[in-house]
Image: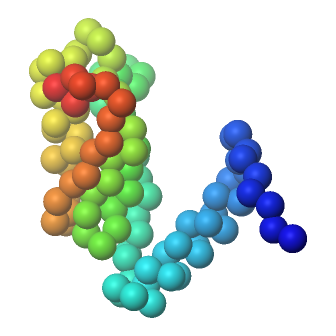
């Protein structure tokens, strides 16, 4: 019998099984997604990270999973610049839990 099991902090290998199953099923329906998982970092001259974007590019759409800029640099367009930095994207999709997190 199958059981639904909720796991917090699941193993990377288990996440890959779901990703690969999803991508295979979708590729059969709509073609190869050309998946690119990437990170884009905002660094100062000493190289510490001051912001970052974690995302995926698939089917030529940018999916922003997480976007963060240190409070001192917010409101200056750095997040927008990180999103615009991904070349080849046909468009982008962002999800947020806070009304002004992408301002």
Q: Farthest residue in the bottom direction? A: 28
- The image shows residue 53 at horizontal and vertical percentages of 35, 39
Give the residue drawn at x 39%, y 83%.
Answer: 32
Q: Quadrant of the C terminus?
A: top left
Q: Nearer the viewer, residue 1 or 100?
A: 1
Can see residue 40?
Answer: no
Q: Looking at the rendering, which quadrant does residue 79 occupy?
A: top left
The residue drawn where x is 66% and y is 68% is: 17
Identify the residue shown where x is 44% and y is 58%. 37
Answer with the quarter of the image where residue 98 lies: top left
Residue 34 location, x and y as percent?
37, 75
Where is 53 relative to 28, above or below?
above
Which of 28 and 64 lies nearest the eye of the viewer?
28
Q: Is residue 95 visible from the viewing direction of this image?
A: yes
- In this rendering, position of residue 93 left or right of residue 38: left
- Residue 21: x percent and y percent? 59, 75
């Amino acid at each position: 019998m199958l059981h639904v099991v909720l796991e917090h902090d699941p193993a990377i290998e288990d996440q890959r099984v779901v990703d690969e199953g999803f991508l295979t099923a979708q590729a059969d329906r709509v073609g190869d997604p050309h998946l690119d998982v990437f990170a884009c970092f905002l660094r100062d001259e000493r190289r510490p990270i001051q912001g970052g974007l974690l995302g995926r590019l698939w089917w030529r759409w940018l999916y922003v999973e997480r976007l963060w800029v240190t409070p001192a640099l917010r409101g200056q367009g750095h997040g927008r610049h990180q999103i615009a930095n991904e070349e080849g994207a046909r468009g982008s999709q962002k999800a947020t839990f806070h009304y002004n997190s992408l301002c």
